[in-house]
Amino acid sequence: MSANGYLQIGLYVAILLLAAKPLGSYMAHVYEGERTILTPVFGPVERIFYRLIGPRATDDQGWKAYAVSMLVFNAVGFLAVYGLERMQGGLPLNPQAFSGVAPDLAFNTAVSFATNTNWQAYVGETTMSYVTQMLGLAVQNFVSAATGMVVVVALIRGLRARSASGLGNFWVDMTRTTLYILLPLAVLLALLQVSQGVVQNFSAYVPANPLEGGSQLLPMGPAASQIAIKQLGTNGGGFFNVNSSHPFENATGLSNFGELLAILLISGALCYTFGKMVGDTRQGWAVLAAMTVIFVVLLGVAEISEQAGNPLLTQLGVDQVASETQTGGNMEGKEVRFGIANSALWATATTSASNGSVNSMHDSYTPIGGLVPLFLMQLGEVVFGGVGSGLYGMIIFVILAVFIAGLMVGRTPEYLGKKIGPFEMKMAVIAILAPPLAVLVGTAVSVMAEPSAAAIWNQGPHGFSEILYAFSSMGNNNGSAFAGYGANNVVTNVLGGVAMIVARYWVAIPTLAIAGALAVKQPVPPSLGTLPTHTPLFVALLIGTVIIVGALTFIPALALGPIVEQLLLNAGKTF
Amino acid sequence: MVHAMDDVLILIVFAASMLVTYGLLVLADRIR
């Protein structure tokens, strides 16, 4: 990889970490209900909204009321998107006259966007009308992201509470998240995208005559506004089928950098928000450090593997060495304008976050290069993770780590002064095991069921990786695809839809239950036996816990896919 | 007509999934 590549990656990580404090601090002000720089703009809108929903609707809620509000809100969101998809043929803003989406695909897509997964078994530019994209998908991009963020805020309030039962109010938190955090950031990013050439219009598709002859239809639409929130909200659902590989969705190097930064921006900054809200910013930095270490190490593996390329091609005389005239390495499925560095960086970022957008085709990665995004999803999307969901997933792992440490020294585990009891551990185990259950059961059923098994477009271990990737993606609310698999079949659509529901709510509900249980506990002062949770030692313990749980759960499945594929590649066979 | 039946089936699958999820909430409340 060139010095330019290293520089861009270094710049990316540096800006990401530098932004954590100012943005995290701002978000803490928002969640504390304090006045912010945007209060004069959004304050009146906020008050009108509260008046509309009624005075009782803004009362402090216990964990059950908070969780029920979340489920009801998301269920209504699902029904709205499902209805729009099914009826889009008779609705306006449909210049290409697309008919209604088939029921199983509409179900998969509606669940996908309501759960912040944004798995796409459809082709955007040939399936969805502008009204479905804007009123259905883009709206869910905002509110599903906000849902993840408010759940982690409820958990933070539970952790810092002193014998209280309330965790805040779901509707107030949703309103403030959307108005004060997501909307302004999305407007700024959308303007940057438009300035770089990303399309934003209601035009019919434009016919063009390519240089090689024939004719082509250039898709149009309100893309920039949707792309901004798709990145910031770790949604990832592309306006166009090839997502951010498309020049109308990601036009230049600068637009690429902006989109890349947006993937991890909020998730990283929320760590600081967490530290600030619990009154000890070192706790937030420790969690962010654990995330960053895992991210940087796996990024290195992906970059090295992709830069090394395919040794079988070298034997055939193909020059894969980086030089002044080419990036070298494995460029199959990658945009020349982004090269190895920005493609592997995006693949690592999009799967460490539960984003799922792509600027290159992961199916074309080398076996080990493809293993990195696969494994990052299988870790449970806690390395930065989805906005909010990544942090609450990581805090669940923190609870597991202090429990393991407690077992080692024979003391009751505690975190931030709260004793971790049997109930919290039961809930943590459910939250950690639910996504792997969805992934492994979904994969097992799909490789056996005829409609889904017949949709594999590659042979051997790479074919297995296609399905494992699909369910690792849906079963962890990521949404990216290996893209060598015909996922639009009834089995995958329905099974995948259920997997996305399990992955989202079977983690969020135990998290809220833990928040509720911790909120009523009186904090105990630290003693000699208290394990400090802000030290490098604890960061190492946390990293070890995340990696060991992920490895123990998924190495057998990975051995059947990318690991055996790499061994076969070494023996001279490629897929 | 065929699609209307499919819609009903899909909505049943969704309702069942959410009901089981709500069951987890009730279970968590009970075992506390």
Image (cartoon, coloured by chain):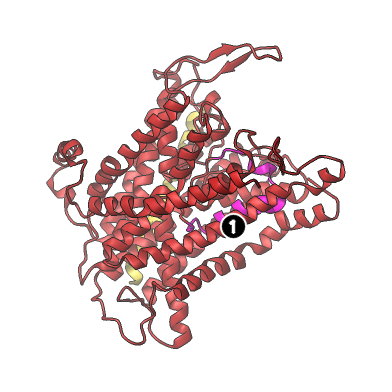
Residue B19 in sight: no
Q: Quadrant of the C terminus of chain A?
A: top right
Residue A370 inside the magenta-drawn segment: yes
Chain ID for yellow: B
Residue A544 in sight: yes
* Percent position of residue A284, x then y: 36, 63
Q: Colour of chain A?
A: red
- Is residue A75 shown above or below A244? below
**Residue A212 relative to residue A527: left or right:** right
Circle 1 residue: A298
* Percent position of residue A462, x then y: 73, 48
Residue A331 inside the magenta-drawn segment: no
Q: Quadrant of residue A300?
A: bottom right
Q: Identify the element where label 1 is drawn.
A: helix
Q: Which residues are magenta?
A: A358-383
**Residue A315 relative to residue A287: left or right:** right
* Percent position of residue A42, x then y: 20, 38
* Percent position of residue A523, x then y: 25, 76
- Is residue A14 shown above or below A291? above
